[in-house]
Image: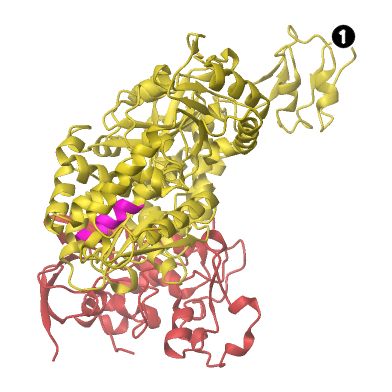
Amino acid sequence: MLHYVTINIDGAIIRAPKGTSVLDTAIEYGICIPHLCHVPGLSDIGACRLCIVENVVNGHSQITTSCTLKVQEGMVIRSNTERIRRLRHNIAELLVAEAPNSRAIQDIAVRCGVKKVRYPFRNNNCVLCGRCVRACSEIWHANAIGFIGRGKERHVERPLNLREEFCKGCDYCIQICPMTITPCDGPMKTGEEYLCGKCESQLIVTENIPEKCVWCELGKSFCGRYSGG
Amino acid sequence: MPKLATKEDLQAMERQLILDRKKVIKTVIICGGTGCKASRSQSVIDAINNELLTQEMESAVQLRVTGCHGFCEQGPIVVIEPDNTFYCHVTPEDAHDIVAGTLKNGEIIERLLYTDPVSGRKIRTELEIPFYQAQDRQLLSHNREINPYSIEDYIANGGFSALSKAVDGLTPEEIIHEVKVSGLRGRGGGGFPTGRKWTQCHQAPGDEKYVICNADEGDPGAYMDRCVLEGNPYLVLEGMMIGAYAVGAQKGYIYVRNEYPLAVKHSRLAVQQARKYGLLGEGILGSSFSFDVDVARGGGAFVCGESTALMASLEGKVGEPHPKDVHTAVNGLWNKPTLLNNVETWANIPPIILKGAKWFSSKGTKGSKGTKIIALTGRIKNTGLVEIAMGTTIRDIVFDIGGGAMDGKAIKAVQTGGPSGGCLPVEEFDLPIDFDVLHEAGSMVGSGGMVVMDESSCMVDVANYFLTFLQDESCGLCVPCRLGIDRMLEIITDITEGCGTPAQIDLLEELADTVTQASLCGLGKTAANPVLSTLRYFREEYEAHINDKKCPAGVCKALIEYYIDPEKCTGCGVCKSACIHGAISGEKKELHIIDPALCQKCGICINECKFEAIQVK
């Protein structure tokens, strides 16, 4: 039997089954918390930090990722405060400066209010969200890819850089990679990266019509609708 | 070897050992800590051993190789008991004089005595040396009494009596209460109240619990834990045993970094010896308490000093931190309640149990009790390991214990708390060593590293150094830490290379704030401290780099130029022949000139010039 707890997200009183995360609960109830590394059905590692919320405990608010935070009775969550919006903006800016070519990440950045990027663009092919690594090990139990190195050296690689035979060729890693979603205006050339801002103008139109506000699989939670799996 | 089955066995053994030791008249104590070993104390040990044999003194004199004495700069250190004569910078050639002179005839060898750099006088005993006088050595003073290879030494000095007091007479609740009342706070960096952590772990449901000693010390310039674990591993072990008894754990781990070979060796040996005496195992000292400890070696990642990363590493997984929404005291190693404390925290437990919480809390300030070991390094006269009562001011540490600046330069700042700490300017030197006060000032006590800097240090360059360290050591899992540190470093590099803009300072501040608030673990949350504290106290240096394109300390290579002072140059040509880049030209006995296009600012010529003619502008 499921045990339910009552929590408060942005003033809304919500009943959620014990053991679920705050992010899942919020999405379920149509509260928009941006996220990137979270994929339904996979474990959460709190890597992208976009889904940060304020967890108010005894009057003190602690900042933590909602994907790794499990609901508890009486929990008070603030997902859209000035402080959170500013931090989320800065994180999204860091992400999009790293991979301006990804439409998914551009989308997220624009929705987090990034209009101008204050860092030099880098055309990286990976933002290390870890979606592929977790899907490979948790859904397919293949362990064909994993993280290697630490800090700046961290990258996704096959075991020992050579064991290809673990891969089952399911292509799931490619499907859920935020870099593989077709860019809006085609790939940008190195050195000519910019934020097109088209998402932003669309956003104004579709802000009140959540169903239409879907640019990609990743954008879904921005509008609140959530189709699961 | 007899097992110590009861409390009485332990007391009897202690009495017997003390009686045996009274027969020894003279003892030569030689430091075998890593600092002195690096100054070749092993050859001194061998030489003195040989001399004792050749002069047939081996029965009358006891030789004791101990852990660190703290004054590492003066190593190798030799102390002769019972007179407590203190010799420093001892070489193997001095062995004959020490044995024939001091040990046989009680002569004092003047040349080996410590010279006070301030007054210039020779000092005979440790207690008279200003470096030691200003300290309050509660933990470190044991080091010279104990050979880390001998559990008997520890028992003879009252070792394990706190454990026997705890398991035979105190309930776990009473022990936790004592630790709580003592006001002890975690010595590893966070300063979390130890008693509260113990309570959480004690109350956490479950029969299977663990205790861990975190000896994965990795701050640049810090080696407090190393010396405690190398010099007196039994003290740490006893603390862990008391903690395990209090929270109900059956198994403990000492997680020590593999770069500390001596600490690994000594802690392993301590565990083996304790097992032999039955101090680890089933039914310790006749009670129902059973406990065992294993030593685990860290693989060289700084981030594994973070509790969740350390536990992942112990479990055999990649050493990466995890979100800490549930405390590790409730859900830690293998998802069981786990009590993790730092080496120094554990070492403080036996004295608290033995002498009482009141004794401990009589030292220190309102929020920070007891003593703290500090690794004092940098541009000062006396460097080494010092132990002071909490609340001692930075000024006392730097000037009284450290002896002030070396080569007459003005002291500018002190970096406390390792890479996660901050830089405090000389104007703030009246601040006491106190968790809350230093945090308020933008730095932290941290694990206790203290690097003193003088006017030859550029604070932007210092921030650059620590960011580079953290960029290498960040695990790379979360975005604010991985990309945030990377971008902060990018901005600081711009500034040191003279292409910074005023807007970048604001961006740097905003980014630093984001990294602090949004990162996953303690490493990221404190990674911006070097930037924030230098910006807070040394903003004018940043501005000089950006607006005037000048490095006031003359460190940042892109912003400085070497030139030869025409009045001082004698035309000797030493610099010309020393310059590996061929940047210096000039005829013999005539003024030499540096070609800025060729000069790589390596500094070789400055070191070679005897007339101080080469200067930086």
Q: Residues within 10 Å of mark 1 (few under 14, many from 20)?
A: few
Amino acid under disc 1: Lys
Q: Is residue B281 left or right of residue B607?
A: left
x, y percent for residue B404: 45, 19
Q: Is residue B349 visible?
A: no
Asked whether residue B289 is drawn in magenta, I would say no
x, y percent for residue B61: 51, 31
Q: Identify the secondary structure beneath mark 1.
A: loop
Q: Residue at x 64, y 30 (%)?
A: B51
Magenta stretch bounds: B237-246
Tell me the quarter of the image containing the N terminus of chain B: bottom left
- Where is mark 1, residue-wise? B589
Vertical arrangement, residue B160 with respect to residue B199, above or below:
above
**Front position in the image: B534 or B148:** B148
**Front position in the image: B481 or B578:** B578
Asked whether residue B239 is drawn in magenta, I would say yes
Vertical arrangement, residue B162 with respect to residue B312, above or below:
above
x, y percent for residue B530: 42, 41
Task: Look at the image and give the colour of chain A.
Answer: red
User: Picture quarter containing residue B573?
Assistant: top right
